[in-house]
Image: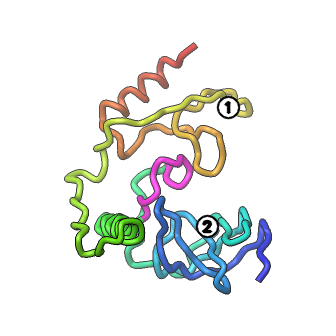
Amino acid sequence: MQLVKGQVVSLRIHDIAFGGEGVGRLDDFVVFVPFVLVAELVEAEITEVKKSFARAKLVRVIEAAAERVTPACPHFAACGGCQYQHVAYATQLAIKHKQIADLFERIGGLKRELVAPVIPCPAPYGYRNRIMIRSQWNKPEQKLNIGFVRWDCGLVEDISECKIAEPALNEQIRHVRAHPPP
């Protein structure tokens, strides 16, 4: 199958790669799609085609996995800061454990069983104590965007708050928004 940019395809997701992209296959050709889960059937638009793989953006989920949840953040899938908010927390931990075990096995030759389970965070939201906020003038809307660089382009996604950041950091975002730099 010859893939071209802009083509919409149906894919069954077989794995989650390091970084959070789902791995689907079309006739043994790998297609990476963000914001999906293992076993999901999705419709995706091809955005980039390389010699041995392609990248796509999620168009819609045809068959959702039971572990899919509604993200807590209204900016999820745009701001580029989170890859797993659409995944139930216990499943996030399992995905991360699998990724680390895969690395230790492939690179270090160690048995997967040696990798201990991921220790859950007591608070899956409001825990991050360091974030990198950017600002960018939004010429069409004539306003300053304050937020994170989008995952799909170099523009800044304007955010009201970051759900994973500590409350003090969100207070700083509100302060900068109320008193923007010159």
Lower sequence index among marks 2 and 1: 2
User: Which residue lies at the image location 66% right of the left edge and 46% below the top edge?
Assistant: 153
Between residue 158 and residue 116, name the one nearer to us.
116
Q: Which mark is residue 106?
A: none
Q: State whether residue 70 appears in this view.
A: yes
Stretch in magenta: 75-86
Main SS of the magenta part reads loop
Between residue 56 and residue 51, name the one nearer to us.
51
Identity of the amino acid at label 2? Leu
Return the residue at label 1.
138
Position above or below: 44 against 138 = below
Identity of the amino acid at label 1? Asn
- The residue furthest front is 109
Return the residue at label 2.
58
Q: Secondary structure at mark 1?
A: strand
Q: Residues within 10 Å of mark 2 (few under 14, many from 20)?
A: some
Q: Residues within 10 Å of mark 1 (few under 14, many from 20)?
A: some
**Residue 113 point in image, percent of width and height:** 24, 75
Position above or below: 70 against 131 = below
**Residue 69 point in image, percent of width and height:** 40, 67
- The residue furthest bottom is 27
User: Which residue lies at the image location 29% right of the left edge and 68% below the top edge?
Assistant: 90
Position above or below: 42 against 161 = below
Q: Secondary structure at mark 2?
A: strand
**Residue 3 point in image, percent of width and height:** 77, 75
- The residue furthest top is 182
**Residue 26 point in image, percent of width and height:** 66, 82
Q: Is residue 144 magenta?
A: no
